[in-house]
Image: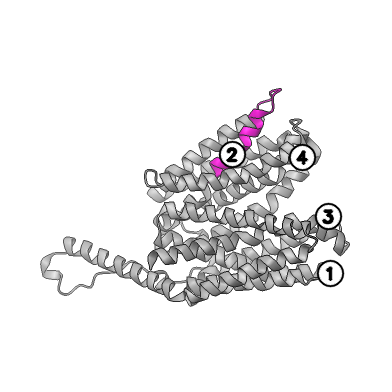
Amino acid sequence: MVSLLLSIIYVAFISLGLPDSLIGSGWPVMHAQLHVPMSYAGIITMIIAGCTIISSLMADRVTHRFGTGKVTAVSVATTAIALFGFSFSGAFWMLCLWAIPYGLGAGAVDASLNNFVALHYESRQMNWLHCFWGVGAAISPFVMSMSLTHNLGWASGYRFIGIIQVVLSIILFMSLPLWNRKERETALAETVSVEAALAETVPSETKRTETAPTKAAPASAPRLTLPQIVRIPGVPEVLVAFFAYCALEQTAGLWASSYLVQARGVEVTTAAQFASLFYLGITAGRFLAGIIAGRLNDRQLVRVGVVVVMIGIVFIAVPLSVQWPALAGLVMVGFGCAPIYPSLIHATPATFGADKSQAIIGVQMAAAYVGTTFMPPLFGAVASVTGMWMFALFLLLFTVVMAVMTEWTNKIVEV
Protein backbone atom coordinates (compact mmCIF):
# COMPACT_ATOMS: atom_id res chain seq x y z
CA MET A 1 0.00 0.00 0.00
CA VAL A 2 2.84 2.36 0.84
CA SER A 3 4.52 1.82 -2.54
CA LEU A 4 1.18 2.36 -4.28
CA LEU A 5 0.66 5.65 -2.47
CA LEU A 6 4.19 6.76 -3.30
CA SER A 7 3.53 6.01 -6.98
CA ILE A 8 0.40 8.14 -6.81
CA ILE A 9 2.39 10.97 -5.22
CA TYR A 10 4.86 10.71 -8.11
CA VAL A 11 1.90 11.13 -10.45
CA ALA A 12 0.72 14.13 -8.43
CA PHE A 13 4.13 15.79 -8.82
CA ILE A 14 3.97 15.24 -12.57
CA SER A 15 0.56 16.95 -12.55
CA LEU A 16 2.10 19.83 -10.59
CA GLY A 17 4.66 20.44 -13.34
CA LEU A 18 2.38 19.87 -16.33
CA PRO A 19 0.79 23.34 -16.64
CA ASP A 20 3.85 25.36 -15.61
CA SER A 21 5.43 25.74 -19.06
CA LEU A 22 2.27 26.00 -21.16
CA ILE A 23 2.09 29.79 -21.26
CA GLY A 24 5.73 30.18 -22.23
CA SER A 25 5.51 27.63 -25.04
CA GLY A 26 2.16 28.82 -26.42
CA TRP A 27 2.32 32.58 -25.89
CA PRO A 28 4.05 33.50 -29.19
CA VAL A 29 0.91 32.29 -30.96
CA MET A 30 -1.60 33.18 -28.24
CA HIS A 31 -0.76 36.89 -28.02
CA ALA A 32 -1.09 37.32 -31.78
CA GLN A 33 -4.50 35.64 -31.92
CA LEU A 34 -5.74 37.54 -28.88
CA HIS A 35 -4.37 40.84 -30.28
CA VAL A 36 -2.37 41.80 -27.20
CA PRO A 37 1.31 42.74 -26.81
CA MET A 38 3.90 40.05 -26.12
CA SER A 39 4.56 41.63 -22.71
CA TYR A 40 1.03 40.82 -21.52
CA ALA A 41 2.20 37.32 -20.63
CA GLY A 42 3.70 38.93 -17.54
CA ILE A 43 0.24 40.01 -16.39
CA ILE A 44 -1.04 36.43 -16.48
CA THR A 45 1.98 35.03 -14.70
CA MET A 46 1.72 37.75 -12.03
CA ILE A 47 -1.93 36.83 -11.37
CA ILE A 48 -1.02 33.16 -11.15
CA ALA A 49 1.89 33.91 -8.82
CA GLY A 50 -0.21 36.15 -6.59
CA CYS A 51 -2.94 33.53 -6.19
CA THR A 52 -0.29 30.86 -5.62
CA ILE A 53 1.21 32.89 -2.79
CA ILE A 54 -2.24 33.32 -1.19
CA SER A 55 -3.07 29.61 -1.38
CA SER A 56 0.37 28.66 -0.04
CA LEU A 57 -0.21 30.83 3.02
CA MET A 58 -3.64 29.22 3.51
CA ALA A 59 -2.36 25.66 2.98
CA ASP A 60 -1.78 25.00 6.68
CA ARG A 61 -5.38 25.61 7.73
CA VAL A 62 -6.90 23.97 4.67
CA THR A 63 -4.72 20.85 4.89
CA HIS A 64 -5.34 20.36 8.59
CA ARG A 65 -9.07 20.64 8.07
CA PHE A 66 -9.48 18.41 5.01
CA GLY A 67 -6.29 16.32 4.85
CA THR A 68 -3.49 16.22 2.30
CA GLY A 69 -5.22 13.72 0.01
CA LYS A 70 -8.40 15.78 -0.41
CA VAL A 71 -6.50 19.04 -0.81
CA THR A 72 -4.28 17.49 -3.49
CA ALA A 73 -7.17 15.93 -5.39
CA VAL A 74 -9.32 19.07 -5.30
CA SER A 75 -6.37 21.29 -6.22
CA VAL A 76 -5.48 19.19 -9.26
CA ALA A 77 -9.16 19.20 -10.28
CA THR A 78 -9.18 22.99 -9.89
CA THR A 79 -6.17 23.39 -12.17
CA ALA A 80 -7.83 21.06 -14.69
CA ILE A 81 -10.93 23.28 -14.75
CA ALA A 82 -8.72 26.35 -15.14
CA LEU A 83 -6.86 24.77 -18.06
CA PHE A 84 -10.14 24.05 -19.83
CA GLY A 85 -11.11 27.65 -19.12
CA PHE A 86 -7.90 28.79 -20.80
CA SER A 87 -8.65 26.62 -23.83
CA PHE A 88 -12.08 28.27 -24.34
CA SER A 89 -10.87 31.82 -23.76
CA GLY A 90 -11.36 34.10 -26.74
CA ALA A 91 -10.17 37.29 -25.04
CA PHE A 92 -7.25 38.28 -22.85
CA TRP A 93 -9.44 39.19 -19.86
CA MET A 94 -10.77 35.63 -19.85
CA LEU A 95 -7.22 34.28 -19.49
CA CYS A 96 -6.73 36.61 -16.51
CA LEU A 97 -9.96 35.31 -14.97
CA TRP A 98 -8.99 31.64 -15.32
CA ALA A 99 -5.50 32.37 -14.01
CA ILE A 100 -7.06 32.86 -10.55
CA PRO A 101 -8.24 29.26 -9.94
CA TYR A 102 -5.10 27.96 -11.63
CA GLY A 103 -2.86 29.83 -9.18
CA LEU A 104 -4.98 28.90 -6.16
CA GLY A 105 -4.90 25.21 -7.07
CA ALA A 106 -1.17 25.15 -7.83
CA GLY A 107 -0.15 26.77 -4.54
CA ALA A 108 -2.29 24.53 -2.37
CA VAL A 109 -1.11 21.27 -3.90
CA ASP A 110 2.53 22.39 -3.85
CA ALA A 111 2.58 23.25 -0.14
CA SER A 112 0.50 20.29 1.05
CA LEU A 113 2.33 17.67 -1.01
CA ASN A 114 5.76 18.92 -0.03
CA ASN A 115 4.86 18.80 3.65
CA PHE A 116 3.33 15.31 3.37
CA VAL A 117 6.46 13.93 1.72
CA ALA A 118 8.76 15.73 4.18
CA LEU A 119 6.84 14.15 7.09
CA HIS A 120 6.36 10.63 5.79
CA TYR A 121 9.23 9.87 3.39
CA GLU A 122 13.00 10.05 3.13
CA SER A 123 15.14 12.66 1.41
CA ARG A 124 15.68 10.41 -1.61
CA GLN A 125 11.93 10.34 -2.30
CA MET A 126 11.74 14.14 -2.01
CA ASN A 127 14.49 14.59 -4.60
CA TRP A 128 12.99 12.03 -6.96
CA LEU A 129 9.54 13.56 -6.62
CA HIS A 130 10.87 16.98 -7.62
CA CYS A 131 12.60 15.22 -10.49
CA PHE A 132 9.15 14.09 -11.60
CA TRP A 133 7.99 17.70 -11.48
CA GLY A 134 10.60 18.32 -14.17
CA VAL A 135 9.14 15.48 -16.21
CA GLY A 136 5.73 17.15 -16.08
CA ALA A 137 7.19 20.54 -16.99
CA ALA A 138 8.97 18.96 -19.98
CA ILE A 139 5.81 17.26 -21.29
CA SER A 140 3.76 20.45 -21.68
CA PRO A 141 5.95 22.19 -24.31
CA PHE A 142 5.97 18.96 -26.30
CA VAL A 143 2.16 18.75 -26.20
CA MET A 144 1.82 22.43 -27.17
CA SER A 145 4.35 22.01 -29.97
CA MET A 146 2.46 19.02 -31.37
CA SER A 147 -0.81 20.96 -31.24
CA LEU A 148 0.67 23.89 -33.12
CA THR A 149 2.55 21.70 -35.61
CA HIS A 150 -0.63 19.84 -36.56
CA ASN A 151 -2.61 23.11 -36.84
CA LEU A 152 -4.84 22.24 -33.87
CA GLY A 153 -4.22 25.60 -32.23
CA TRP A 154 -2.91 26.63 -28.84
CA ALA A 155 -6.29 25.97 -27.24
CA SER A 156 -5.96 22.26 -28.04
CA GLY A 157 -2.66 22.17 -26.19
CA TYR A 158 -4.37 23.47 -23.07
CA ARG A 159 -7.24 21.06 -23.59
CA PHE A 160 -4.98 18.02 -23.89
CA ILE A 161 -3.16 18.92 -20.66
CA GLY A 162 -6.53 19.60 -19.02
CA ILE A 163 -7.68 16.09 -19.94
CA ILE A 164 -4.53 14.62 -18.41
CA GLN A 165 -5.18 16.64 -15.25
CA VAL A 166 -8.76 15.33 -15.06
CA VAL A 167 -7.52 11.74 -15.25
CA LEU A 168 -4.93 12.46 -12.57
CA SER A 169 -7.50 14.07 -10.30
CA ILE A 170 -9.75 10.99 -10.63
CA ILE A 171 -6.82 8.79 -9.61
CA LEU A 172 -6.16 11.06 -6.63
CA PHE A 173 -9.79 10.96 -5.48
CA MET A 174 -9.79 7.16 -5.70
CA SER A 175 -6.59 7.04 -3.60
CA LEU A 176 -7.94 9.03 -0.63
CA PRO A 177 -8.08 5.97 1.70
CA LEU A 178 -4.37 5.37 1.11
CA TRP A 179 -3.48 8.91 2.23
CA ASN A 180 -5.51 8.55 5.41
CA ARG A 181 -4.00 5.13 6.16
CA LYS A 182 -0.46 6.45 5.71
CA GLU A 183 -1.07 9.32 8.13
CA ARG A 184 -2.58 6.96 10.74
CA GLU A 185 0.32 4.51 10.41
CA THR A 186 2.90 7.27 10.83
CA ALA A 187 1.09 8.72 13.86
CA LEU A 188 0.89 5.26 15.47
CA ALA A 189 4.59 4.55 14.83
CA GLU A 190 5.54 7.89 16.40
CA THR A 191 3.37 7.21 19.45
CA VAL A 192 4.92 3.76 19.98
CA SER A 193 8.41 5.20 19.55
CA VAL A 194 7.85 7.97 22.10
CA GLU A 195 6.25 5.56 24.60
CA ALA A 196 9.19 3.18 24.27
CA ALA A 197 11.67 6.00 24.85
CA LEU A 198 9.71 7.21 27.86
CA ALA A 199 9.58 3.70 29.33
CA GLU A 200 13.38 3.65 29.40
CA THR A 201 13.69 6.96 31.23
CA VAL A 202 10.71 7.17 33.62
CA PRO A 203 11.25 5.59 37.09
CA SER A 204 9.41 2.31 37.51
CA GLU A 205 7.14 3.60 40.27
CA THR A 206 5.78 6.36 38.00
CA LYS A 207 5.31 4.29 34.86
CA ARG A 208 1.83 3.18 35.86
CA THR A 209 0.49 6.69 36.53
CA GLU A 210 2.03 8.84 33.83
CA THR A 211 0.83 8.98 30.26
CA ALA A 212 3.50 9.23 27.62
CA PRO A 213 3.26 12.41 25.55
CA THR A 214 3.06 11.84 21.84
CA LYS A 215 4.63 13.80 19.06
CA ALA A 216 2.14 16.39 17.88
CA ALA A 217 0.49 15.15 14.74
CA PRO A 218 -0.27 17.73 12.06
CA ALA A 219 -4.01 17.20 12.47
CA SER A 220 -3.92 18.17 16.16
CA ALA A 221 -1.29 20.90 16.03
CA PRO A 222 -2.38 24.47 16.89
CA ARG A 223 -2.85 26.77 13.90
CA LEU A 224 -0.15 29.40 13.61
CA THR A 225 -0.65 32.88 12.23
CA LEU A 226 1.90 34.45 9.89
CA PRO A 227 3.36 36.72 12.62
CA GLN A 228 3.73 33.69 14.89
CA ILE A 229 5.49 31.72 12.14
CA VAL A 230 8.05 34.41 11.33
CA ARG A 231 8.87 34.79 15.04
CA ILE A 232 10.03 31.17 15.23
CA PRO A 233 13.86 31.19 15.50
CA GLY A 234 15.41 30.37 12.13
CA VAL A 235 12.26 30.87 10.05
CA PRO A 236 13.05 34.39 8.73
CA GLU A 237 16.46 33.19 7.62
CA VAL A 238 15.14 30.09 5.83
CA LEU A 239 12.47 32.20 4.10
CA VAL A 240 15.20 34.44 2.69
CA ALA A 241 17.03 31.29 1.57
CA PHE A 242 13.96 30.08 -0.33
CA PHE A 243 13.49 33.53 -1.87
CA ALA A 244 17.14 33.62 -2.97
CA TYR A 245 17.11 30.08 -4.37
CA CYS A 246 14.08 30.68 -6.57
CA ALA A 247 15.48 34.04 -7.69
CA LEU A 248 18.64 32.17 -8.72
CA GLU A 249 16.86 29.33 -10.52
CA GLN A 250 14.29 31.43 -12.39
CA THR A 251 16.77 34.14 -13.40
CA ALA A 252 19.16 31.51 -14.73
CA GLY A 253 16.44 29.71 -16.66
CA LEU A 254 14.86 32.84 -18.13
CA TRP A 255 17.93 34.86 -19.09
CA ALA A 256 20.58 32.24 -19.81
CA SER A 257 19.94 32.16 -23.54
CA SER A 258 20.02 35.96 -23.83
CA TYR A 259 23.28 36.12 -21.86
CA LEU A 260 24.96 33.49 -24.00
CA VAL A 261 23.97 35.29 -27.21
CA GLN A 262 24.57 38.91 -26.21
CA ALA A 263 27.52 38.63 -23.82
CA ARG A 264 29.34 35.52 -25.04
CA GLY A 265 28.58 35.50 -28.76
CA VAL A 266 26.99 32.04 -28.79
CA GLU A 267 24.74 31.25 -31.75
CA VAL A 268 21.03 31.57 -31.05
CA THR A 269 20.22 27.91 -31.70
CA THR A 270 23.11 26.70 -29.53
CA ALA A 271 22.16 29.09 -26.73
CA ALA A 272 18.55 27.88 -26.79
CA GLN A 273 19.68 24.25 -26.57
CA PHE A 274 21.91 24.88 -23.57
CA ALA A 275 19.25 26.98 -21.86
CA SER A 276 17.01 23.92 -22.01
CA LEU A 277 19.90 21.80 -20.71
CA PHE A 278 19.84 23.94 -17.57
CA TYR A 279 16.49 22.38 -16.68
CA LEU A 280 17.68 18.98 -17.81
CA GLY A 281 20.57 19.42 -15.38
CA ILE A 282 18.10 20.11 -12.56
CA THR A 283 16.05 17.02 -13.41
CA ALA A 284 19.07 14.73 -13.76
CA GLY A 285 20.68 16.22 -10.67
CA ARG A 286 17.62 15.48 -8.55
CA PHE A 287 17.61 11.90 -9.74
CA LEU A 288 21.27 11.56 -8.72
CA ALA A 289 20.62 13.35 -5.42
CA GLY A 290 17.98 10.75 -4.63
CA ILE A 291 20.56 8.01 -5.14
CA ILE A 292 23.18 9.55 -2.82
CA ALA A 293 20.66 10.86 -0.25
CA GLY A 294 21.27 7.76 1.88
CA ARG A 295 24.91 8.78 2.34
CA LEU A 296 24.44 12.55 2.72
CA ASN A 297 21.90 14.32 4.90
CA ASP A 298 19.81 17.29 3.80
CA ARG A 299 22.30 19.90 4.99
CA GLN A 300 25.17 18.19 3.22
CA LEU A 301 23.18 17.94 -0.01
CA VAL A 302 22.48 21.68 0.16
CA ARG A 303 26.16 22.45 0.72
CA VAL A 304 27.26 20.25 -2.18
CA GLY A 305 24.68 21.94 -4.39
CA VAL A 306 25.88 25.42 -3.43
CA VAL A 307 29.50 24.54 -4.20
CA VAL A 308 28.59 23.13 -7.63
CA VAL A 309 26.50 26.23 -8.41
CA MET A 310 29.39 28.53 -7.52
CA ILE A 311 31.81 26.56 -9.69
CA GLY A 312 29.30 26.78 -12.54
CA ILE A 313 28.97 30.55 -12.10
CA VAL A 314 32.76 30.89 -12.29
CA PHE A 315 32.72 28.97 -15.58
CA ILE A 316 29.97 31.26 -16.87
CA ALA A 317 31.78 34.45 -15.87
CA VAL A 318 35.35 33.64 -17.04
CA PRO A 319 35.96 35.90 -20.07
CA LEU A 320 37.51 33.34 -22.40
CA SER A 321 37.43 33.46 -26.18
CA VAL A 322 36.08 29.92 -26.34
CA GLN A 323 32.41 29.31 -25.60
CA TRP A 324 32.40 25.88 -23.98
CA PRO A 325 33.18 27.04 -20.38
CA ALA A 326 30.08 29.25 -20.30
CA LEU A 327 27.94 26.50 -21.80
CA ALA A 328 29.28 23.90 -19.37
CA GLY A 329 28.89 26.34 -16.49
CA LEU A 330 25.20 26.78 -17.21
CA VAL A 331 24.62 23.04 -17.06
CA MET A 332 26.63 22.89 -13.80
CA VAL A 333 24.46 25.60 -12.26
CA GLY A 334 21.37 23.53 -13.07
CA PHE A 335 23.00 20.41 -11.69
CA GLY A 336 23.97 22.22 -8.49
CA CYS A 337 20.51 23.72 -8.04
CA ALA A 338 18.97 20.24 -8.19
CA PRO A 339 19.21 19.07 -4.54
CA ILE A 340 18.89 22.44 -2.81
CA TYR A 341 15.14 23.09 -2.99
CA PRO A 342 13.97 19.53 -2.18
CA SER A 343 16.50 19.17 0.64
CA LEU A 344 15.52 22.47 2.28
CA ILE A 345 11.87 21.41 2.24
CA HIS A 346 12.59 17.90 3.52
CA ALA A 347 14.62 19.30 6.42
CA THR A 348 11.75 21.48 7.66
CA PRO A 349 10.03 18.97 10.01
CA ALA A 350 13.35 17.96 11.57
CA THR A 351 14.49 21.58 11.87
CA PHE A 352 11.34 23.20 13.22
CA GLY A 353 9.15 20.28 14.36
CA ALA A 354 6.53 18.16 12.61
CA ASP A 355 3.73 20.05 14.35
CA LYS A 356 4.84 23.31 12.69
CA SER A 357 6.05 21.99 9.34
CA GLN A 358 2.85 22.49 7.31
CA ALA A 359 2.52 26.12 8.39
CA ILE A 360 6.21 26.83 7.76
CA ILE A 361 6.34 25.04 4.41
CA GLY A 362 3.32 27.04 3.24
CA VAL A 363 5.17 30.28 4.03
CA GLN A 364 8.33 28.87 2.44
CA MET A 365 6.39 28.26 -0.79
CA ALA A 366 5.08 31.83 -0.66
CA ALA A 367 8.62 33.22 -0.23
CA ALA A 368 9.79 31.02 -3.10
CA TYR A 369 7.06 32.32 -5.41
CA VAL A 370 7.92 35.91 -4.53
CA GLY A 371 11.50 35.28 -5.66
CA THR A 372 10.28 33.50 -8.79
CA THR A 373 7.92 36.33 -9.70
CA PHE A 374 9.87 39.50 -9.06
CA MET A 375 13.60 38.81 -9.37
CA PRO A 376 13.85 37.74 -13.06
CA PRO A 377 12.05 40.93 -14.21
CA LEU A 378 14.29 42.95 -11.91
CA PHE A 379 17.36 41.46 -13.57
CA GLY A 380 15.88 42.32 -16.98
CA ALA A 381 15.48 45.93 -15.90
CA VAL A 382 19.01 46.07 -14.48
CA ALA A 383 20.56 44.37 -17.53
CA SER A 384 18.81 46.79 -19.89
CA VAL A 385 20.85 49.56 -18.25
CA THR A 386 24.14 47.87 -17.34
CA GLY A 387 24.31 45.08 -19.92
CA MET A 388 24.02 41.28 -19.80
CA TRP A 389 27.46 40.93 -18.21
CA MET A 390 25.60 41.34 -14.89
CA PHE A 391 24.11 37.85 -15.32
CA ALA A 392 26.85 35.92 -13.51
CA LEU A 393 27.14 38.55 -10.78
CA PHE A 394 23.37 38.45 -10.20
CA LEU A 395 23.45 34.66 -9.88
CA LEU A 396 26.43 34.82 -7.53
CA LEU A 397 24.69 37.38 -5.30
CA PHE A 398 21.67 35.17 -4.70
CA THR A 399 23.81 32.05 -4.30
CA VAL A 400 25.81 33.73 -1.55
CA VAL A 401 22.66 35.01 0.16
CA MET A 402 21.13 31.52 0.04
CA ALA A 403 24.29 29.87 1.39
CA VAL A 404 24.66 32.37 4.24
CA MET A 405 21.01 32.09 5.24
CA THR A 406 20.93 28.27 5.24
CA GLU A 407 24.06 28.10 7.41
CA TRP A 408 22.68 30.83 9.69
CA THR A 409 19.47 28.83 10.08
CA ASN A 410 21.47 25.74 11.00
CA LYS A 411 23.33 27.61 13.72
CA ILE A 412 20.17 29.16 15.14
CA VAL A 413 18.26 25.89 15.48
CA GLU A 414 21.27 24.16 17.04
CA VAL A 415 21.57 26.71 19.84
Q: In this rendering, would 320 be left or right of 241?
A: right
Q: Marks 1 and 4: which is nearer the front?
A: 1
Quarter of the image for residue 28 reads bottom right
Task: Give the labeled residue for mark 3.
Answer: 38
Q: In this rendering, would 233 be left or right of 159?
A: left
Q: In this rendering, would 142 be left or right of 201?
A: right
What amino acid is at disc 4? Ala
Task: Give the labeled residue for mark 1.
Answer: 91
Q: Is there CB contact under 8 Å for labels 2 and 4?
A: no
What amino acid is at disc 2? Val
Determine the residue positioned at 24% across, 70% down: 212
The picture places residue 92, in percent across and down from the top left corner, at 82, 67
Residue 70 higher or lower than 333, as above or below = below
Q: Check disc 4 and report its element: helix, strand or loop.
A: helix
Q: CA distance from mark 2 to mark 4?
A: 20 Å
The picture places residue 250, in percent across and down from the top left corner, at 65, 48
Label whose residue precedes the other's in the sequence (1 or 2):
1
User: Looking at the image, which residue sits at the far top?
Assistant: 321
Magenta residues span: 318-338
Q: CA distance from mark 1 to mark 4?
A: 32 Å
Q: Is there CB contact under 8 Å for labels 2 and 3?
A: no
What amino acid is at disc 3? Met
Task: Give the labeled residue for mark 2.
Answer: 333
Can residue 357 be seen here?
no
Q: Which mark is residue 383?
A: 4
